[in-house]
Amino acid sequence: MDFFAKAAELSSGRQSFAVATIVRTQGSSSAKPGSKALIDAQGKILMGWVGGGCAESAVRSEALRCIRTEKPILITLNMQDEVLGVGMPCGGMMDVYIEPVVPQPELLIAGHGRIAQVLANLGKLMNFSITVNDPSADHESFPEVDRLVQQDFNLTETPISASTYVVIATLHKNDHLWLQRALQSHAAYIALIASSHRAKLVLDYLQMEGIPKEQLERVWAPAGLDLGAATPEEIALSVMSQIVSVRRGGSGKPMKDAKLKDQPATANDPSAPVIRQCATDDSA
């Protein structure tokens, strides 16, 4: 029960983690079928047991990959190889199923205009949790919103996490303050909807205020992909397209021009096992 209570605690805190479960063992193995472990987004085992040494290291490494790709995987650990292993092989093999638990991404929109309204609608269709912060916003204009903050520029009411995608569509009212606030966080995406001229003015101002250029490079300004967008609806589509591209690691290129990425054979089939030699991997 402590194991599942810890998992519930991580989930309620909107923290990413993975659950590793041993589903089969063959030969000698210190862990048994049904053994589980909770692994956080830094690759640390918080609770549970999946074997020591080489087995643990391999599971931690694959758990990080699962969290990053948001896809489960079945791996087979080969602990019989003295050359690629740790020199003292356990002599067995085991299959481990690793399932990522990633919080629902949040789309945080600062603003209330037509672009913000369409963006909220598109975000809901993409299964984002929607937060809108603007004193002029209301539930009639944003029926799909999960959280509405109507206080005038109260940033304390809108926490920003690593799974938050921030879009500033304030029509230039306090947009520099919003950018400062977002850049202090670990937001997954920060974008400013503005013209190229306005975007440059804001970023130059923030740099003069002491924000390092490297930090400012996190900001997508002007926001969105180059779709030739002209209407508010098209601009919102270009921004949402960029958010999906950033989240999923897309190139933003036309499909016929995009090169296929090198992906493991399990990319489209989570049930297909990946064979891993049980070698020590400190990268986790």
Image (cartoon, rainbow, N blue to C red):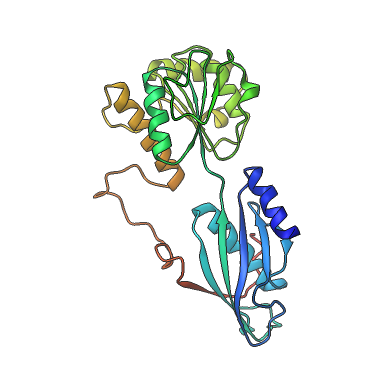
Q: Which residue sits at x=49%, y=13%? A: 136
Quarter of image, res 177: top right
Q: Position of residue 33 (x, y in %)?
A: 64, 77
Picture mark count = 0
Q: Quick one: 55 or 84, which is closer to the camera?
A: 55
Q: Is residue 46 visible?
A: no
Q: Is residue 152 visible?
A: yes
Q: State the image coordinates of residue 28 (x, y, percent, origin top left).
A: 68, 86
Residue at the spot 40% in from the left edge and 29% down from the top edge: 119
Residue 104, how many percent across, how many down?
A: 53, 43
Establish if 245 lies above or below 170: below
For residue 11, side relative to residue 114 (left or right): right
Quarter of the view holding residue 91: bottom right
Depicted 251 relative to depicted 55: above or below: above
Vertical arrangement, residue 98 with respect to residue 206, above or below: below
Q: Is residue 125 above or below residue 198?
A: below
